[in-house]
Image (spheres, rainbow, N blue to C red):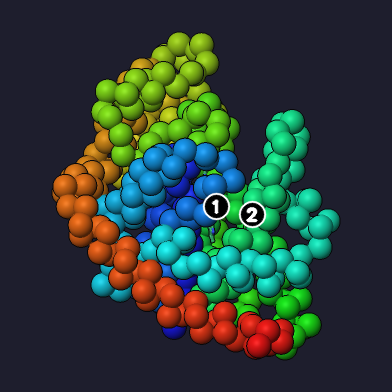
Amino acid sequence: MPRILTGIKPTGIPHIGNYFGAIKPALDLQHQGEAYYFIADYHSMTSLFDPRQRLEFTLGVALDWLACGLDPARTVLFRQSDVPEVTELTWIIGTMAPMGLLERAHAYKDAVAKGRTPNFGLFAYPVLMAADILLYNSNIVPVGRDQKQHVEITRDLAIKFNLTYGETFVVPEPRIRDESAVIPGLDGQKMSKSYSNTIELFGDEKTLRKKIMGIVMDSRTPAEPKPDADQNLAIQLLKLVAPAEVALDHENRLRAGGLGYGDLKKTLFAQYWDHFAAARARRAELTANPDYVEKVLRDGAQRARATAGDVLARARKACGLA
Ligand code: TYM
């Protein structure tokens, strides 16, 4: 049975890029192996410095996983920081990581390019992520394309450790779905919390309608045929949230001419709102039951720690830590 693992960083409210890029693919896999899904609260510390917000976003991501269909009887859902073994493994495999490799990691490179002063945590970010993956003997890591490099770094570190100290770690594979590898945001760039171009997975109806109706289109009239209809952002997003025939019908009408952008955006909002209606209702129920959510996380941490303890012991033994 393959071990499947992925994580979400609680630095804000998850958006549909996180959902279609990682949450949904991960949930679709949860019955094909043993799944370990977690909330990467240690990682959030490299860029978020408000403890109250960290707790709030961490709980929010747990609610999102459960509302979207994570089955806690089967899948292990846990907070990264409930398994502090991961920090020890970060040190151990950090000794396998050349500085040059980490200097090329995109989160660090982007921060430097933007003139930010990177902290050690940001520099070590890919090593902590590698420790997340290796600590649970993960075979498959479902992620969006922006995390591919991090999984490749993980593979490099695992292979180097295995060569240096003997077979210890499972070498994981990223699992990236072509059709949802990079979900575009409201401005057409990659959807990202840091670009303020997100459509939240769960949020206030009025705000989200306004955001979607505010998508900027070109100035062609409704009657004009649009041969590039498949490149239209609203069509691309509609393909994610609407039944295939509805999306195709709108694409064809846009291509032929006659469908106005305003009507297209209204359909997009309605379909988006509908797509997540059942999950939204489940989330509201779960929000009213915080003790249950806390219990799921505590049970998850216990199960995760059992696996983590075994792998860490194996790694310590391999490299001669008594
Ligand atoms: P994070 O929290 O930035 O993103 C969570 C997941 O969402 C995917 N994603 C997207 N996919 C498609 N289109 C987009 N626009 C888009 N935006 C985000 C990301 O690729 C990711 O899969 N470092 C990770 C968290 C993490 C992790 C791990 C993941 C920590 N340890 C171990 C996997 C395994 C991160 O910051 O993801």
Q: Which residue is mark 1?
A: 43
* Side of 3 where 64 appears, left or right: left
Mark 1 CB lies closer than 8 A to ligand 1:
yes
Secondary structure beneath disc 2? helix
Mark 2 CB lies closer than 8 A to ligand 1:
yes
For image coordinates 31% across by 66% down, the residue present is 298
Q: Quadrant of the C terminus?
A: bottom right
Dot 1 amino acid type: His
Observer-nearest residue: 296 or 121? Answer: 121
Dot 2 amino acid type: Tyr
- Tag 1 near tag 2, CB within 8 Å: yes
In the figure, residue 318 lies in which quadrant? Answer: bottom right
For image coordinates 26% across by 28% down, the residue present is 205
Task: Where is residue 25? Give x, y as percent.
Answer: 43, 59
Q: Quadrant of the N terminus?
A: bottom left
For image coordinates 60% across by 54% down, the residue present is 147
How many labels, in total?
A: 2
* Side of 81 where 163 appears, left or right: right
The answer to whether residue 276 is above or below residue 76 is above
* Mark closest to the chain's N terminus, 1 or 2: 1
Secondary structure beneath disc 1? helix
For image coordinates 68% across by 84% down, the residue present is 321
Q: Give how far apart the Cα atoms at labels 1 and 2 are.
A: 7 Å
Task: Where is residue 133? Give x, y as percent.
Answer: 56, 68
Q: Which residue is mark 2?
A: 125
Residue 102 is tagged as none
The answer to whether residue 254 is above or below residue 168 is above
Q: Residue furthest front?
A: 322
Please say whether residue 233 is visible from this viewpoint.
no
Task: Where is residue 161? Give x, y as percent.
Answer: 73, 78
Observer-nearest residue: 306 or 207? Answer: 306
